[in-house]
Image: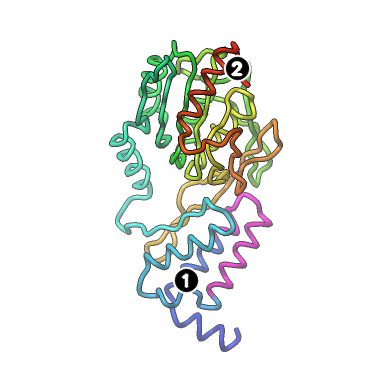
Amino acid sequence: MPLFTLLTALACPVQAETLDAAANAVESAYFNAARGAEIATDIRRWSATNRYAVDCANPSAFALKLERDLDAHDGHFQVRLSRPEAPAGQWLADWRAAGMAANAGVRDVRLLDPSIGYLRLSAFYAPDQAEPKLRAALLLLQDARGLILDLRQNGGGDADTANLLLSSLIDPKTTSVQSIETRSGLTPQALSTTSLPRFPSDRPVVVLVDRRTGSAAEFLAYSLQNEKRAIVIGSRTGGAAHMIGEPTRLPHSLSITIPNGRPVNHKTGGDWERLGVTPDQNGGDDPLHVARRWIETQDALGQGAR
């Protein structure tokens, strides 16, 4: 090892150990083997040049900076401090507890005048938590002239719940809208057999999005748009398409979550990673008003989907 590299690595051995473990984890788990090797090479270079030495005594700042650098490769990387005494699945228990406090992501459901349904979802929590809430919401809205699904500031969550809701909105004959690419190849992803009330297919649907709409929320907007079931209104979304597995423990009480799959839409042959979901219409200063006017226009024309 060159003298400069040796000296800089020794300047913060804690970081060197963590970065080496992170590089190995990414190289073995990232869904695209070639890209995983490239990202791992970058991580090892960051370690060799002692990129984070100024934060050697501040693991929180180190984790934040490492995650930001990894985000340049893929926005679904997460680097977190973990409690050493916490069991491996503690993050899941914490997330479920947050779901209970957030009404499983169902933040607002009501009828707007004149009889337009409005459903705002702030996140997608586990199906067993979210399904009863979504069922109640869709029962309330089933007679509405149209539906506005507000996914603004929804960063995503459980893909199975988004899948469940998608199944209740599109043609029941559609059994799959995308495949999942992993290191094992490309596998069609079946839609859930929905237990939710179906929103009538002859009534228009609008999805509201913004730059903070991400992940599973983008999947729902992208799928409804490409199935010609809804119009998307707002601003371009965040562009986080890749999927993640459980966090991998790293040395010194850190963990890393690594993207291990990507969706491939059957209609487009691609996904929304980095590009985001492009709206059909700009929302202007009042996206909700634009959505209501669009539904009223479609209702007057007797059109449900685009």
Of labels 1 and 2, the one closer to you: 2
Query: Residue 138 magenta-drawn?
Result: no
Query: Residue 35 magenta-drawn?
Result: yes
Q: Which residue is mark 2?
A: 171
Q: Based on the displayed image, in which of its 4 quarters is residue 54 positioned?
A: bottom left
Instruction: Determine whether 260 is above or below 60 in the image.
Output: above
Which residue occupies the extreme bottom position in the image?
3
Q: Which mark is residue 97?
A: none
Q: Position of residue 173 (x, y in %)?
A: 63, 16
Element marked by disc 1: helix
Q: Main secondary structure of the magenta part?
A: helix
Element marked by disc 2: loop
Three-letter amino acid code of the residue under disc 1: Glu
> Which quadrant, please, contains the N terminus?
bottom right
Q: How many marks?
A: 2
> Which quadrant, please, contains the C terminus?
top right
Which of these two is toward me, 85 or 269? 269
Q: Is residue 191 left or right of residue 138?
A: right
Which of these two is toward me, 228 or 96? 228
Q: Position of residue 114 (x, y in %)?
A: 42, 15
* Mark 2 neighbour density, 10 Å: few (under 14) some (14–19) many (20 or more): some
Magenta-tinted stretch: 25-47
Instruction: Determine whether 168 is above or below 38 in the image.
Output: above
Q: Based on the displayed image, in which of its 4 quarters is residue 80 positioned?
A: bottom left
Q: Position of residue 137 (x, y in %)?
A: 38, 20
Residue, x 37% and y 29% (percent of image)?
A: 106
Q: Which mark is residue 17?
A: 1
Estimate the spatial distance between the alpha carbons at disc 1 and disc 2, rounded to whole Å: 52 Å
Residue, x 43% and y 19% (percent of image)?
A: 117
Labelled pair 1, 2 in contact (Cβ < 8 Å) = no
